[in-house]
Amino acid sequence: MALIVQKYGGTSVGTPERIRNVAGRILATQREGNSVVAVVSAMSGVTDNLIKLSRAVSEQPTDREMDVLLSTGEQTTIALTAMAINALGGRAISLTGAQAGILTDGLHTKAKIANITPRQIRKYLNDGVIVIVAGFQGQTLQGTITTLGRGGSDLTAIAIAAALKAHNCEIYTDVDGVYTCDPRIVPRARKIDVIAYDELLEMAGSGSKVMQSRSVEFAKKFNVPFEVRSSFNQNRGTIVKEENPSLEKVVVRGVSIERKQAKVTITNVPDTPGTASRIFTALADANVVIDVIVQNVSVSGATDISFTLSQDELDKLGGLLDEVVREIGAGTVAEQSGIAKLSVVGIGMRTHSGVAATLFEALGKGGINIQMISTSEIKIAVIIDEAKIAEAANLAHEAFGLAGPAAA
Amino acid sequence: MALIVQKYGGTSVGTPERIRNVAGRILATQREGNSVVAVVSAMSGVTDNLIKLSRAVSEQPTDREMDVLLSTGEQTTIALTAMAINALGGRAISLTGAQAGILTDGLHTKAKIANITPRQIRKYLNDGVIVIVAGFQGQTLQGTITTLGRGGSDLTAIAIAAALKAHNCEIYTDVDGVYTCDPRIVPRARKIDVIAYDELLEMAGSGSKVMQSRSVEFAKKFNVPFEVRSSFNQNRGTIVKEENPSLEKVVVRGVSIERKQAKVTITNVPDTPGTASRIFTALADANVVIDVIVQNVSVSGATDISFTLSQDELDKLGGLLDEVVREIGAGTVAEQSGIAKLSVVGIGMRTHSGVAATLFEALGKGGINIQMISTSEIKIAVIIDEAKIAEAANLAHEAFGLAGPAAA
């Protein structure tokens, strides 16, 4: 008998009808001869409503109380899901994060899982009962309720799969899996059957928001293979696992894009130790999240430093950099929005050369100007004009032969 | 420094604005130099919505899961209330029933409190923190969430007051306190300053639904005096406490009425042991809740038995009694709705005679026919035509001099 951990996101349990659908899927999985633990999120919209309520009583709600409040969202779903399974003739019970033995640190609203003692889960599974666990939440050693922050339910599922040594971990969402590119932009994009953790991480960090990076990192760390698939159909999804020789044969796994980026360039930065640190410490202190950083080789003791960030982050800059530039004796600060990032990702790049050349050639043929280039071991990212991003994505997708034969 | 337990009902915390109001009251109580524990209910309407959700996924939701679901209502309120207090510059933390140490039996949806270990509450109070506790809920020894059933939040407050040996227990609601009669029916009704547990119990059992009987019984058992008052003004409310000589000086404390009653009469019941039991066992087995039972002295080996019940309960009878009547060899079954019950209540009755006479005389002068009479040690109840109930209530209220001098 296999042990399967499933996770259903907010959209999958967004209405009573969808909860009944999910209940049917869970029960079917058990009736195929498996033990099942299902982790569920809050019904879509519920968390936002709770946040609105909190703002109506406090401008700056305490983090501890925010966790007590938000955790009710998942608690509602576990009860409803268990009821729905019982109504279908199954036997299910619900457990909150605390009851499921999910122990976290005390960092409210973004707690880290410290340990899982799935004693209760095991007890019910042994009795043939389906266990429905609230995602996104846990408790401290002192018994205080905590939440895990964005993507926390995925994390709960993967952590429970690791703790129980589950045979399968299935992450159900509203998309069919991970695609070679966003199908709304690249019509010939196709679903990826198998992808390595690191590839998904690079894709996730580049705008393919099928899962939060921390959940993928956690899965990688504890080597928990999982499948991303849709709760609205029976299609196979995308299996995410550790890399192996067969995965390396594919040079580029996918193309991911990120719109609404902005670029900041500081000119004439003195090429002395500590100046870059001054700039990026100032940005970090102001909680500005930056993405790509590019610094070219210094010419005559000074260099230009550029970095990209989400357009939304641009507002936080204010006059911050002007001050830093004055201090370090650099030149000017230039901001530019309306740009986008395109990344090609694949662990096969490590052993194959010429990937950058293929990408640059494809973009060049399309007359697309590359403003910045940044590479990692398994990714090449370029910054281009946002107006050209769809064209660029299609060109790159074609250049690396990612289109499926079926999708014409 | 006094320790005060307050309880705010669903209407008192029905909107974010009202929660902010309640937060202000709690904080003011602390700033007057008290330690404060506040027990809160679910925001009004929330529990009903959750019940609706449950019906949308299951025709007959499991009791265990119902408790997991419903307990989120109070959990939402504790977080919001604590946030609101913190926003006002106070220091508050929230505790679920389980965290507050409220241990119950495992009878889901109507659990009984078995024990309270208020270790966490004490710890926070010692640190000068206001503690907000979720009413209506607890957990079993195994850590399963339970709820206490109707009026459960009152019960939580009184049980915590008992466990902490609180100086005061204040039950905040949407009325000013307990009245000598319903002011909508008797305009000259006035608020009662002090009432004995037993009097409130008799009033509650007779339609004055300011509190559920079980909470009053619990308070009586553990001798916890409490005050029922409004959260919408600063008026003093009604203090409920154990009886004492000064309370006994008042013969009648109040008049309570119950509309929409029905009467069932079974004629010619053989006066042999066990026949009454046959009738009422049959009713109990069918979950019919009955109120007053009257059986007169037997004449020539047979007697008539009458009982009253809520009109809503009448439907449950069906042909049930016809069958019983046949079995025991009684006469006929007659049902009559459109009647009402009027009760006069007061512990002073025990030592004063003539109360019944005064009541009957007052009703007789008004030409109101008494259909049934039932008495307890501290209550006289009469069943009359429902159309006459307002008139009867005013007559009784006058006859016992209950009107306040101020209310003209």
Image: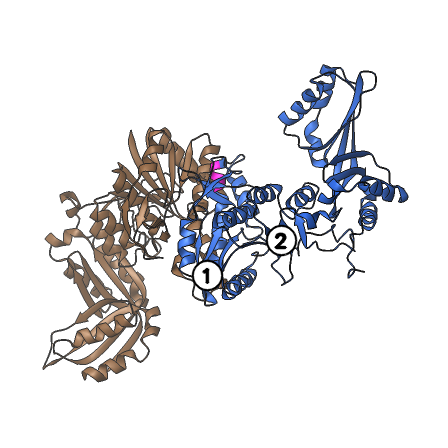
Chain colours: A blue, B brown
Residue A275 left/right relative to A145: right
> Please, is residue A61 above or below residue B135 in the view?
above
Most extreme residue toward the front is A245
Q: Secondary structure at mark 2?
A: strand
Q: Quadrant of residue A13?
A: bottom right
Q: Residue beneath label 1, please?
A: A83
Magenta stretch contains residue A119: no
Q: Write down the quadrant of residue B235 in the picture.
A: top left
Q: Residue at x 81, y 46 (%)?
A: A396
- The label number, if any, that marks residue A228 in the structure image: 2
Q: Is residue B321 left or right of residue A197?
A: left
Dot label at residue B162: none
> With B117 as the anchor, is B19 left or right in this view?
right
Kind of residue indicated by mark 2: Val
- Majority SS type along the magenta span: helix
x, y percent for residue A316: 68, 30
Give x and y (percent) for residue A397.
Answer: 80, 49
Chain of the residue under label 2: A
Q: Residues within 10 Å of mark 2 (few under 14, many from 20)?
A: many
Identified at 65% across, 48% down, the residue is: A210
Residue nearest the observer in this picture, B37 or B118? B118
As shown in the figure, which amino acid type bears the numbered disc 1? Met
- Where residue A175 sits, quadrant-wise, is bottom right
Whether residue B45 can be seen here: no
